[in-house]
Image (cartoon, helix red, strand yellow):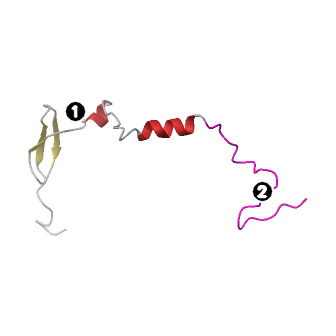
Amino acid sequence: MKPEMHPVYPPSRITCACGNVVETHSTRGSFSVEICSNCHPFFTGKYKLLDTQGRIDRFRKKYAAQPAKDAAAPAEGAAPAKGGKKAKA
């Protein structure tokens, strides 16, 4: 391999605003971030789904009362699916 072809990859420290420190290697060097996996709400389980204008409630209300239909058995007298073969009797 040619010398000096690859960048320098020294050890670095990534520091989060919450105080978490990650030791790694980086071409960027040491730096700080505002949020990490230890304090991000999605990874900590504190993430709450925002319900915009009640859409989730309307969805649950709409589909909660409907019984589950058996998709495997077609209704009597129903036409076969397009492109499907007819069953022999």
Quadrant of the rendered image containing residue 24: top left
Q: Residues within 10 Å of mark 1 (few under 14, many from 20)?
A: some
Camera-nearest residue between 4 and 12: 12
Query: Which residue is labeled 1 in the image?
Result: 39
Which label belongs to residue 78? 2
Camera-nearest residue between 71 and 33: 71
- Seen at 52% across and 35% down, the residue is 61
Q: Give the quarter of the figure containing the C terminus.
A: bottom right
Quadrant of the rendered image containing residue 51: top left
Residue 70 located within the stretch drawn in magenta: yes
**For the residue labelled by badge 2, is the local secondary structure a helix, a strand or a loop?**
loop
- Seen at 70% across and 43% down, the residue is 70
| Residue 3 percent coordinates (x, y) | 12, 67
Q: Give the quarter of the figure containing the N terminus.
A: bottom left
Q: Residues within 10 Å of mark 2 (few under 14, many from 20)?
A: few
Query: Is residue 84 depicted above or below 61 in this figure?
Result: below
> How far separated are the C-alphas under marks 2 and 1?
55 Å
- Seen at 56% across and 35% down, the residue is 64
Q: Nearer the viewer, mark 2 or mark 1?
A: 2
Looking at numbered disc 2 in the image, what kind of residue is underneath it?
Answer: Ala
**Which contiguous range is marked in magenta?**
66-89
Query: Is residue 16 depicted above or below 89 in this figure?
Result: above
